Image (cartoon, rainbow, N blue to C red):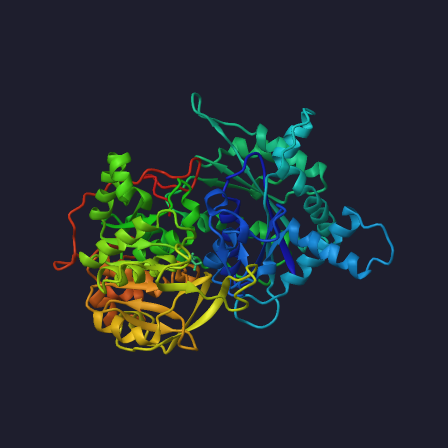
Amino acid sequence: MKYVLVTGGVVSGLGKGVTASSIGVVLKACGLRVTSIKIDPYLNTDAGTMSPFEHGEVFVLDDGGEVDLDLGNYERFLDIKLTCDNNITTGKIYQSVINKERRGDYLGKTVQVVPHITDAIQEWIERVAVIPVDGKEGPADVCVIELGGTIGATIFSRHNNNGILDAGDIESMPFIEALGQFSYRVGPGNFCLVHVSLVPVLSVVGEQKTKPTQHSVRGLRGLGLTPNILACRSTKVLNENVKEKLSQFCHVPASNIITLNDVTNIWHIPLLLRKAHDAILKVLNLQGVAREPDLDEWTNRAKLCDSLHDPVRIAMVGKYTGLSDSYLSVWKALLHASVACRKKLVVDWVPSTDLEDTTAKEAPDAYKAAWNLLKGADGILVPGGFGDRGVQGKILAAKYAREKNVPYLGICLGMQIAVIEFARSVMNLQDANSTEFDPDTRTPCVVFMPEGSKTHMGATMRLGSRRTYFEVTDCKAAKLYGNVSYVDERHRHRYESQVNPDMVAKFESAGLAFVGKDETGKRMEIIELPAHPYFVGVQFHPEFKSRPGKPSALFLGLIASSCGQLDALLQNPSQPNKHIPAKISSNGVFSPKVYPNGHQNGHAYKPVKSLVNGNYYANGNGVHV
Ligand code: GLN
């Protein structure tokens, strides 16, 4: 097993995760099998208890692991399926060491950070690195390890002896020590350290400054880690003399210094890192084994994405707080589907509370703006969520989509509220509700349905991959999935639409179809309104399994229907990109086909304001891709 460790220096938010995933892509393109591990030095055992509005989305794995969103990047970029153990946190490591101590495994010794914690970290890495994640048997060739946090910044402050260490820096220390030992243990030829750093440009003179990177690398060395490759974030390509200077002061050959300059979309990053493949293969002694990277698919996709101008507008109705990472996988899944439909994705974030009547009185401008966005959308998506804040707004969005024949995809909570809305408006069951929002409701149509104990509140979430069987074959969802009899998708919820068997017939005759159920037939997994152009609700989260080249079926359905391509797609659902007779010319430029009958709502394309400050991978319009 060979290891590539990716560390970050100078400042956080350099896109270390995307860089590490992209290194994986390049190595995979060289014919190597790649797995990955993300180290998060925080104390939480997993990301399940962390607020997505502070930390970004909680990504869910097949095995039910609730992990850092970076694992989503790895899965999407490398088309692999990771396990919860591929995300290491301080909490997990300490828990394992304390469990061992309680079992008496340390034979009376004093248990300490060094060597017990540091040994546990190394053992964990070696154990997890060999788990196959690409559907093939046997261990991968290379494991990419991303260390969360910024190393250089720690040293920068320590170096200045000003005593400023933040919590994250302190938490990283055992991992840095363990990884230093690990690099020595696995030996040269098996370990490659890529340090992602920042080369800022002083805007007045436009000079690329190397000092922060120099400090960061010095700090790294001081901790026993020697970088083999520097990946430098900068607005423009690094000048040769800047590379020479960095090489001289950081003791890294100029040929091993790669610029990660600003690009128009995220799929260009593996193309930038292509330049590093020789250096990485050399350090890892893999030159004879690997081939030249074949990145044609990534090149075409990156160019295609740049060439898309015709917008598809999706209103995302949620608890929007400004951190777009809170719904990262949903956003990516929308993007994958839009690119397949040759449309430029424009996501309008609609805070669901702003759609509610109380906002009309208290903040009429916000109310008007929210309704304008909703009404201007080609399609509406209500993502998952917890708690009752903004639920009424989501119900109103579902009602609007249903009544106005606007394409709708409801995910988890988005499906539950669609069922409630239908029961209330169409079946006249005014007090229909979820017991999550009203435990005493007389018409509970969404109820607490844990898989285990109903009385024990801990660990009652239904998590991970579960099977949904299609009850009906003649429905859009089944067709979009390619007429299969069942699908495996990832879940993360406690409540579930449970329709009283006596009521199923009433719901169905009122026009709501339960087209997918679990193996017991008691849990409603997919709903559809057959008479609507596209109104689909799912209890699971299809966004977690969407891939750039393999968009999720139901997202594709939403986008296709939002831009008038659903009929064409349903005729050829197994070939998502083929439903539009698109042509990519030899220079990779896409020539779009004009659809005379395509649904066009006449919106002029307005760039979306950048949502994450300092995201270097935003494109010229500020739309994150
Ligand atoms: N709050 C709902 C539940 O627990 C929905 C969860 C979700 O949307 N992920 O079932």
> Can the viewer see residue 293 in this picture?
no
Q: Is residue 198 left or right of residue 435?
A: right
Q: Image quarter for residue 606?
A: top left
Which is more toward the observer, 358 or 76?
Answer: 358
Q: Position of residue 349 (x, y in %)?
A: 32, 45
Q: Quadrant of the N terminus?
A: bottom right
Q: Nearer the viewer, residue 327 or 510?
A: 510
Q: Is residue 186 above or below residue 349?
A: below
Quarter of the figure with residue 526: bottom left
- The spot of residue 120 in percent (x, y) is 73, 55
Q: Which quadrant of the figure has residue 590?
A: bottom left
Residue sitting at the far left: 596
Q: Position of residue 148 (x, y in %)?
A: 59, 45
Q: Residue at x 20, y 47 (%)?
A: 375
- Quadrant of the rendered image holding ligand 1: bottom left
Q: x, y (%) of residue 167?
A: 63, 37
Q: Report the front residue among 17 and 472.
A: 472
